Image (cartoon, rainbow, N blue to C red):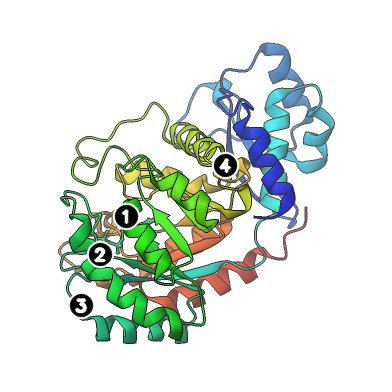
Amino acid sequence: MEGREGEDLRELCGGLALSLAPRVIAVGPGPDGRVRAALRPVGLAPDEREALAAAAVGPVGAAPGRRDPAERELVFERSGLERLAPEWPAAALLSRAVRAWARRPSSVRIAGVLNVTPDSFSDGGRWLDPARAVEHALELVAEGADLVDVGGESTRPGAAPVPADEELRRVLPVIEALAPRLSVPLCVDTSKAEVAAAALDAGATQVNDVSAGRADPRMLPLVAEHGCDYVLMHMLQSPLSMQHDPCYEEVVTDVLAFLRERAAAALSSGIVPERLMIDPGIGFGKTLEHNLELLRRLCELRSLGAPLFVGVSRKAFIGRINAAAGRAGEAPAERIGGSAAAVAACVQGGAAMLRVHDVAVMAEAARVAQALWTHVQD
Ligand code: HH2
C-alpha cells in the first residue's frame, strides 16, 4: 500500500462516515473515455439533492426496476464533484471514490492457490502429497503467479474446523520445501496464530486470514510482531454456518463497515497500513445477489484506502448462474469462463490481487481487462 493510501486508511479508521445513506453505485469510464461516477441520491436532504442534480451530467437515467424518481441515478464528472465536495458530504464521498478508482493499481497481481487438503471444494486431495504440492506451486509460478497461497484447511460452506496439529502436518512440509525454491512470496492461508507462526518461521512471508483476526486473538499481535503482509477478509460467522440464510441490511455498506472495523483492529494491534490488504470474501456468507452486488461495486471498497485482494475463482456463484442457464452439475474446476469474467470485473473494480486456481488463463484475462481500462483518463 502506498503512503498516501496508508494515510487515507488511518483517517478512515479514525471515523469518516462511510455509512452515509447515499451510495456510490458505480465508477468507471464514460463514453468519451473520461471517468464518471454515478450515485443514487437516496436519503439526501432536499438542498443537497438539488445542488447535486444541478451539477450532474446527462443523461440522468432511471435505474432499471426503480420507479421512484427520488432514486434516479445522477452521473457526474470528476471536476463537478470536486467543485461540490467542500460543501456536500455525498459529493465528497463520491469524489473520494473517483480518486481511489483513478489510483487503481497499474497492474493487478495474481495469487496462485495451493490447497493441501483432502476436501477443498474444487481440488480437494489433488495436492496432498507434499512432493506433488511443491511441483504444482512451481507450475503456478511458471504460469505467472506473483504469490503462492498455501492452505491446509478447507473453508468451503459447511466445512468443520481442522485441528491446528493436523493443519500444521499438511502445510509445514510443503512450506519448508517450497520456501527456498520459490521466486515469489509465499503466503499461508490460516486463521490460527499457531499455524501462522510456524509457517512464518518456515519461510512464509504473508498471512491470509479469512477470519480477519476474529478466530484467534493471538493472530493480529503475531502478524504485527513479524511485520509481515496480512490479508483480512469478510465472512459471516464461520464456514460451518455462513451459508445458512445470509442476511445484510445492505451488503456493500455492511461489508465495508466490517472491513473498516477489522482494519482498525489490525492497526491498533500494531500492523502498519502498508502491510494490509482487505477482501470482501466472495462466497463467504453471501447469496448469489450479494456476491454480484459486491463485485459490481468493488470500487466502493477501495474508499478504505487498502489494496483489494479478491477470490472469485471457480466459486459457487458461477455454478448458480450456469445452473440457471441449464448447465447444472458441472464440476467447480470447469467454471473457467465464469471465473475469467469475474476476474475482469475485479480488474475494473480496482482489485490489486486476485486469488485464482487456473493461473495462466486468469492472468491472461486480467491482462486483457487491464489493457481495456488503462486508457481511461481522470
Ligand atoms: N477463498 C477460499 C479460501 N481462502 N482467502 C481469501 N482471502 N479470499 C478468498 O476468497 C478465499 C480465501 C476458498 O477457495 P479454496 O481455497 O479453493 O477452497 P477451500 O476453502 O475449500 O480449500
**Residue at image coords 22%, 42%:** 243
- Using the image, tell me which numbered label, if any, was put on residue 168: 2
- How far, Cα to Cα, is label 1 from label 3? 25 Å
Return the residue nearer the eye: 74 or 142.
142
Q: Position of residue 370 (x, y in %)?
A: 61, 68
Q: Is residue 327 visible?
A: no
**Residue at image coords 57%, 73%:** 368
Q: Do the residues under discs 3 and 4 have CB atoms within 8 angstroms?
A: no
Label 2 Cα crowd, 10 Å radius (few <14 / some 14-19 / many 20+): many
- Using the image, tell me which numbered label, if any, was put on residue 300: 4
Q: Name the residue carrying label 1.
A: 194
Image position of 88 (left or right of 118): right
Q: Do the residues under discs 1 and 4 have CB atoms within 8 angstroms?
A: no
Assign ligand 1 to one image quadrant: bottom left
Q: State which tag comes first along the sequence, 3 or 4.
A: 3
Q: On the image, which quarter does residue 23 sit in?
A: top right
